[in-house]
Every structure is written in structure tokens, then in C-alpha cells.
Image (spheres, rainbow, N blue to C red):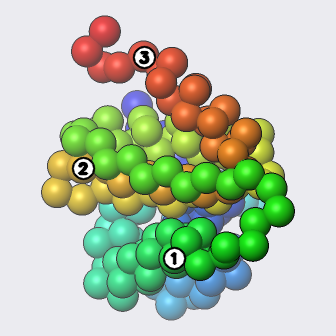
Amino acid sequence: MDRNYNLNEIALMTGFSTRTLRNYLNQGLLKGEKVDGAWQFTSEELDRFFAEPFVREGLRIKRNGIVFDFLADRSKNTKKTCVILDIPVSLKESKTLSAFFCHQMESVSDAVFTFDWSDGSARIILSGAEESVAKIMQAYHGMPSDNE
């Protein structure tokens, strides 16, 4: 069964603010359903949203911005790291991955993350405090694969 995503999870995956996402809802670019006063989005609705050319370009800019900001900040006063994962997966497997990383991000406040899937590959970008990113990566490496 596909899971639903909430507005905060979409904001985590995309780097868009919840305000921007609400604007996309008002413009009809993003479609969802209010359940008990909170927006819920199906995987199919997100697939359609992510396929919009305007949204794809915004996602590309956000992803590149995370990496650029990491590289440009040479005056870090704490240990920081940036990880880019390109993982060949099916669309179904990509949804499991996105849910996993959204869940992991709930336990950290000093890292950012974006997620994208296209042409059979998921791209995950994590950037932030070295300890937080390492914790997420350890959880990812301990995650059971579909081949097990």
C-alpha cells in the first residue's frame, strides 16, 4: 500500500517552504486532500507534481543550491559534511527510500535533505552537521534491501 505524505515531508524532500507549497496548492500545481485539517498527498499526486517542468527546475535549483552553499562556506566553525547518493531503484523502491529519509530527518535539526527520482535513479543529497549526516547514513546502510 502506498503511503501518504504531509506538507512538512514534501518540504523536507524538496527544500521548498511550506508557504511555497501552499502557493502551489492554490495555483493547482500541487493537488492533495485535507484530512482532519492537514494536507495529505498520495505518491501519484507527488509524481505528477514533480513532473511539472516549473517544479522540476525549482527542484534542480534547490538541490544545486545545497551543494553550492556547502562548497562556498569556507568558514565552518563545526564539522560539516555533504553526501550525494545516486541509487538505481524502481519508482516503488524510490518511495520507500523517500519515506525512510523523511523519517530519519525527523530526528535531526542540523541537516538538510533533498530527494529526487528520475529515469530509474534516486538522488539524495544530505548536508549538515557531520554527526547528524553520519547517523542518517549509518541507518541507511543498516536498512534492509529488497534483495534480502
Residue type, mark 3 in image: Pro
Note whether residue 142 is visible: yes
Q: Which of the two residues, 118 or 111, is positioned nearer the viewer here?
A: 111
Note whether residue 22 is visible: no
Which label sits on residue 144?
Answer: 3
Q: Is residue 53 above or below residue 81?
A: below
Question: Label 2's element?
Answer: strand
Residue type, mark 2 in image: Ser
Whichever of callouts 3 and 1 sits on the residue coming sooner in the sequence is 1
Which residue sits at x=66%, y=32%? Answer: 135
Which residue sits at x=39%, y=76%? Answer: 60
Disc 3 crowd rating (10 Å Cα; few below 14, some 14-19, many 20+) is few
Q: Is residue 43 above or below residue 53?
A: above
Question: Label 1's element?
Answer: helix
Mark 3–mark 1 contact, CB under 8 Å? Answer: no
Which label sits on residue 68?
Answer: 1
Q: CA distance from mark 3 to mark 1?
A: 32 Å
Whichever of callouts 2 and 3 sits on the residue coming sooner in the sequence is 2
Q: Does residue 73 appear to the left or right of 52 in the view shown?
A: right
Question: Label 3's element?
Answer: loop
Q: Which of the two residues, 18 or 128, is positioned nearer the viewer here?
A: 128
Q: Is residue 119 above or below residue 133?
A: below
Q: CA distance from mark 2 to mark 1?
A: 22 Å
Q: Which residue is mark 2?
A: 121
Which residue sits at x=36%, y=69%? Answer: 50
Mark 3 or mark 1, which is nearer to you? 1
Residue type, mark 1 in image: Phe
- Residue 26, percent from left and from top: 57, 87
Quadrant in the picture for residue 45: bottom left
Q: Does residue 77 appear to the left or right of 138 in the view shown?
A: right
- Residue 24, percent from left and from top: 53, 83
